[in-house]
Amino acid sequence: KFKQKRQQTRLRMEVHLQYTCGMGTLYQPLKDGWKTGGMTHVQFHIPDLPFPPRKIESWQHRLEQRGGVIRNLVSSSSNNITSLTPFFHSLFFGDSLVVQMVQSYLEPNRHFDRSKATSQGNPDLPLTLATLPNMIQKFKEMQSGNLNRFSHKKMALIVGSAAWDLLLPATYEGPKLEDHLQACREFIQHIRTEYPNATVLWRLPTAIHVHRANPDLCFHLEVQDEHLPSSHLLNKNAPRNPCVDILRYASTSRVQYLYKQQKRIMLDELNVPVIDLYELSYLSAHWLRQGDAIHYQAIEWNLRIFSEYLFAQQPPALPSSLS
């Protein structure tokens, strides 16, 4: 019966062509002044496909097989971290994608022990060597009180930076983001020196889906959005549509490059455990906020990540072969 049911099931495939001719790899300031980022907004729909011969696995099952979303070095497998549950308290610091993971849990009427995780705010800065002193100062203002207050407890400190480093027009990083990557190293080294009793984890970038952005809002209208970064962070010569300003340099290829480089630095160079949500987010475009290419829904995505993986009571065992 199961085989017969699968044979009768029909599927629909959607293919989104984001860029052509390498436009998705262009970096600041090469597309400054463009009305769009060169996105095609072309979609292909293939209806009524037969059920594939291989089973399509859910992302939950894939994560369970992989060992969860927190990755560690094989060489330190005896100290592997598979969940934040054993920590007395977890502090989150970073861009909006990092902060929103916590806010989804701390909103009213959520049944969650608020003593387990907090975030004191978004620094609203890219992480570069130029902004590093300011980032460290903001970190001290927002988090040092809790770190000092709980210094005798087992603490987890989750930090991360990716979105503004890729997207802000005024951030001239070049094709390899070398300045940002060196700032990541120095930021981690500073935190470890100042707070040696805290366990530091790095949240890797999540996928950006430019095809989910609202084309009328982002590429046709002159609009202002108070939720986007303040104007002093944006290039004054760019069209005065903040949504265009933010998404002009967004692409799958650039996010994937930064993801791989941050992961290499954290695991191979610094031996920092990482929260790896990239594959999961790449498969979760439908869980983005409506008309948003960057931010994921609070309950359907962020809350599930928290409850099912980061704070799972019995997280899946991490395979010894996983790196």
Image (tube, helix red, strand yellow):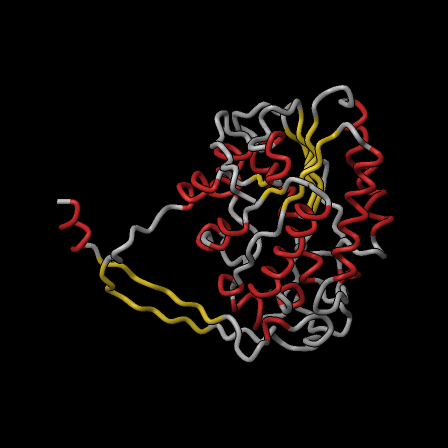
Q: Look at the picture and state if 119 lies above or below 222.
A: above
The percent position of residue 230, horizontal first and vertical second, equals 75, 57
The percent position of residue 309, horizontal first and vertical second, equals 51, 35
Q: Going 66% across and 45% down the picture, which residue do you hit?
A: 267
Q: Look at the picture and state if 245 lies above or below 195.
A: below
What residue occupies the far top of the structure in this picture?
152
Q: Is residue 147 left or right of residue 91?
A: right
Q: Going 74% across and 56% down the picture, which residue do you hit?
A: 181
The percent position of residue 266, horizontal first and vertical second, equals 68, 47
Residue 244: name its quadrant.
Answer: bottom right
The percent position of residue 94, horizontal first and vertical second, equals 70, 45
Tally of numbered discs: 0
What residue occupies the far bottom of the structure in this picture?
21
Quadrant position of the C terminus in the picture = top right
Q: Is residue 231 left or right of residue 19?
A: right
Q: Going 85% across and 42% down the picture, which residue do you hit?
A: 137
